Image: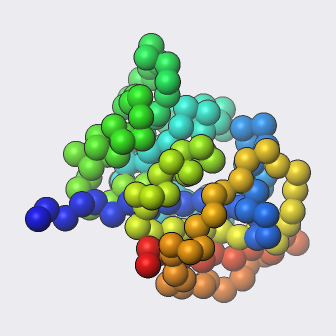
Amino acid sequence: MEEKAKVALVAAMSKNSHALGKNNDLLWHIPEDMKRFKALTASHPVVMGRKTFESIIAILGKPLPGRPNIVITRNPHYAYEGVIVVSSLEEGLKRAEELDPEEIHIGGGAEIYTQALPYVDLLFLTFVDDEKDADTFFPPFEKDFTVVKEHEKKDHNGLSYQWVDYKRI
């Protein structure tokens, strides 16, 4: 039987409520965490929803560089130069695996995280010691995953956060 690509998910959330964002924006912008996202996803396809993709365009002015960007949207006419557009998570995962049979990353947002969780093998999570008003939250995951590594706590401008890596049980 052929091995399937590992599916990894990278997300930052509040430690207690698992809040992700508000108004299609992240709750925190922690430079070290952005560097970690870049390092983890570099050269691997990143599957994400349209709203997440458009928030990246708003920040970077372009798709994520150095890796295939696969955008899920219900709009059959949606197009963006240099980006693969698909109509479902399953189609996105299939296209990603054709590009990289080793590793695929799920880049968000909340709706895509919820849909993708049953397919995910690895979680690379950032827990921020801060509770903010939010309208999107990470889905429950604890019963299906076990901690592989708890990284040392870090601090950014008085904001404490910790990276925790998980694998599916």
Q: Position of residue 27 (x, y in %)?
A: 78, 52
Residue 157 drawn above or below residue 117? below
Within the image, what quadrant is residue 86 found in?
top left
- Identify which residue is drawn at 65% across, 68% down: 126
Residue 41: in sight, yes or no? no
Relative side of 3 to 144, left or right: left
Q: Which quadrant is the N terminus positioned in?
A: bottom left
Q: Nearer the viewer, residue 119 or 53?
A: 119
Task: Give the residue furthest to the left.
Answer: 1
Asked if residue 145 can be seen in this view, the reply is: yes
Relative to 27, say whether 103 is above or below: below
**20 horizontally vs 123: left or right:** right
Residue at image coords 43%, 48%: 46
Give the percent coordinates (x, y) of residue 124.
54, 68
Residue drawn at 44 percent across, 74 percent down: 168
Looking at the image, the residue that sits furthest to the top is 77
Image location (x, y in percent) of residue 12: 66, 61
Residue nearer the viewer, 135 or 169: 169
Tell me what residue is drawn at x 76 percent, y 57 percent: 19
